[in-house]
């Protein structure tokens, strides 16, 4: 399980947002209304921002023609209408000029392929005075079936709000996951102390289900492996994405099983065991395993159906992060500082620096996060590509983000589902520090859990700051740039204020040595000191 987590972690810091120059084709005839996606070029076409300001135009169906010339075209019936023609054979500006010369008031270009922002030479822009937009051919066929006796159309492009309530839900999910994961890690440490389990034997393995990062060399190797994995994903995305999907299915099913099993144990749910040939099998474990495997398989089969699969992906993602925070432990604050600082540099480098190194000027982090076939803004940020089918993807996406559908991006949601997203790594990496703080509270017998609560609140503040900067700049941000300073500085300042920095910095090593020497300093004999040391080790301080 730990191996799965270490392979997937490099990809968890990938996140971005998709937006573009999308609008709405409003079709009506009396009381019946339909709305469809359209894509336009705001520097070329002047389209109203509200429906009330949009001009109502009669729909003229010429989808049997490409409109590359005016031959056999009767301009009389076309005057003042919204003309629909097929895409292809000639460029957009030529079609627009023919439609304009025929008296049409708007041009709709029906496309069977992905909708891209219509463009032309700069000299052509001034020649076209009517709105021009691309629409899906399948949408026009649907509209003509709904309105067989004719219809009126309006073109408008409501601006997407700078703030969407989905961000609040994303914030709540992230803070909940970090808080619960940190609490679970500390509770497990307290259980080990109560049970008197031994500490780690120096190899970083606390028990069969946990992996501890205890040396700077391990941390350096860990981060180096993450860099290698991300670069490999950049160059071999088409093949490696399926490896990540399989890993996610296995790891998330295992994680969900561990979470549900622990939850049922905590609430006192009993187990029914069956014996067969001297082997005992837990019925509860079998049922939980069946449910978890089924959910993981369902996600794997329907992973590209954006209408609802995000619910299951977020559920599996929360379980994945919780199990990660329980499984991976950091032994002291020094390791926390090294790991979080290196991952901060990793995040910033692959988001802000790699665009200067890649041929297309795209950051490696964003390219891997979106996938090579993803839509969204390209190049200068003004071009947009919308798939022909809004609910199915022709490319595979990495399952390493929490996703919440945006509520108020009306035009964008018509063109393709829009999500507010946050990488799992932006939950797990600071969450490891929160988990360490809770374990330190357990070691120091802090009944008020001051370190854990303070660090969890600092994470919340850092995530709010991330979203504020993202909304202000209207571009994705490397969240660790804000989360790491907030959590590390809060923990450091608190330890200094409580005069416990030495213990906080050294972690388990300081605790074991301090407890083993205390009887000697008080005048106890050597045997008593040895007994105290052994007893301390049996309390599971690891």
Image: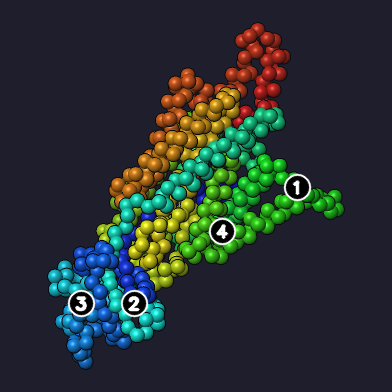
User: Residue lying furthest front in this view?
Assistant: 31
Instruction: Name the residue that disc number 4 marks.
Output: 246
Please report whichever mark, 3 or 4, sits nearer to the chain's N-terminal start: 3
User: Residue lying furthest right in this view?
Assistant: 277
Instruction: Name the residue that disc number 2 marks.
Output: 30
Give the secondary structure at mark 2: loop
Instruction: Name the residue that disc number 3 marks.
Output: 105
* Residue in the image at 47% along x and 31% along y: 454
Instruction: Name the residue that disc number 1 marks.
Output: 271
Please report whichever mark, 2 or 4, sits nearer to the chain's N-terminal start: 2
Residues at marks 3 and 1, CA–CA distance in whole angstroms: 72 Å
Residues at marks 2 and 4, CA–CA distance in whole angstroms: 51 Å
Closer to viewer: mark 3 or mark 1: 3
Please report whichever mark, 3 or 1, sits nearer to the chain's N-terminal start: 3
**Along the line of sight, which residue is nearer the eye, 207 or 131?**
131
Residues at badges 2 and 4 in contact (C-beta under 8 Å)? no
Residues at badges 3 and 1 in contact (C-beta under 8 Å)? no
Residues at marks 1 and 4, CA–CA distance in whole angstroms: 30 Å
Q: Which of the 4 quarters of the picture holds residue 100?
A: bottom left
**Along the line of sight, which residue is nearer the eye, 508 or 255?**
255
Closer to viewer: mark 3 or mark 4: 3
């Amino acid at each position: 399980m730990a191996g799965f987590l270490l392979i997937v972690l490099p990809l968890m810091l990938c996140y971005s947002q998709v937006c573009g120059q999308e609008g709405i084709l409003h079709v009506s005839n009396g009381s019946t209304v339909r709305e469809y996606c359209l894509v336009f070029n705001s520097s070329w076409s002047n389209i109203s921002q509200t429906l009330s300001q949009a001009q109502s135009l009669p729909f003229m169906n010429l989808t049997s023609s490409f409109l590359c010339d005016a031959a056999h075209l009767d301009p009389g019936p076309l005057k003042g209408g919204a003309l629909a023609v097929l895409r292809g054979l000639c460029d957009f500006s030529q079609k627009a000029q023919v439609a304009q010369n025929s008296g049409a008031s708007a041009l709709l270009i029906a496309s069977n392929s992905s909708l891209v922002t219509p463009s032309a030479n700069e000299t052509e822009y001034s020649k076209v005075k009517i709105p021009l937009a691309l629409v899906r051919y399948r949408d026009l066929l649907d509209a003509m079936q709904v309105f067989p006796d004719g219809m009126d159309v309006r073109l408008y492009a409501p601006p997407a709000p700078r703030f969407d309530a989905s961000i609040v839900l994303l914030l709540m999910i992230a803070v909940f996951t970090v808080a619960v994961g940190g609490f679970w890690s500390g509770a497990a440490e307290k259980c080990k102390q109560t049970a008197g389990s031994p500490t780690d034997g120096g190899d970083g393995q606390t028990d069969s289900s946990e992996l501890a990062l205890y040396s700077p060399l391990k941390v350096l190797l860990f981060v180096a492996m993450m860099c290698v994995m991300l670069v490999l994903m950049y160059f071999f995305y088409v093949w490696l994405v399926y490896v990540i999907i399989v890993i996610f299915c296995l790891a998330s099913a295992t994680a969900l099983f561990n979470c549900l099993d622990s939850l049922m144990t905590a609430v006192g749910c009993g187990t029914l065991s069956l014996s067969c040939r001297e082997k005992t099998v837990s019925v509860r474990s079998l049922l939980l395993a069946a449910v978890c495997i089924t959910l993981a398989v369902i996600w794997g089969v329907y992973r590209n159906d954006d209408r609802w699969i995000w619910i299951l992906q977020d559920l599996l993602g929360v379980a994945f992060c919780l199990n990660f925070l329980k499984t991976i432990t950091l032994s002291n604050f020094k390791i926390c500082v090294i790991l979080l600082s290196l991952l901060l540099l990793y995040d910033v480098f692959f988001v802000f620096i790699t665009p200067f190194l890649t041929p297309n000027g795209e950051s490696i982090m964003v390219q891997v996060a979106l996938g090579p076939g993803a839509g969204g803004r390209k190049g200068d940020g003004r071009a947009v590509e919308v798939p022909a089918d809004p609910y199915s993807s022709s490319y595979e996406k990495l399952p390493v983000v929490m996703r919440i559908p945006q509520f108020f991006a009306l035009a964008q949601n018509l063109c393709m589902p829009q999500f507010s997203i946050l990488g799992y790594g932006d939950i797990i990496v600071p969450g490891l520090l929160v988990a360490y703080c809770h374990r330190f509270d357990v070691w120091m017998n802090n009944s008020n859990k001051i370190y854990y609560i303070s660090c969890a609140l600092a994470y919340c503040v850092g995530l709010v700051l991330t979203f504020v900067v993202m909304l202000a700049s209207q571009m994705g941000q490397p969240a660790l740039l804000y989360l790491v300073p907030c959590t590390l500085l809060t923990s450091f300042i608190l330890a200094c204020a409580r005069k416990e920095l030495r213990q906080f910095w050294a972690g388990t090593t300081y605790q074991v040595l301090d407890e083993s020497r205390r009887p000697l300093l008080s005048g106890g004999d050597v045997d008593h000191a040895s007994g105290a040391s052994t007893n301390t080790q049996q309390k599971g301080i690891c």
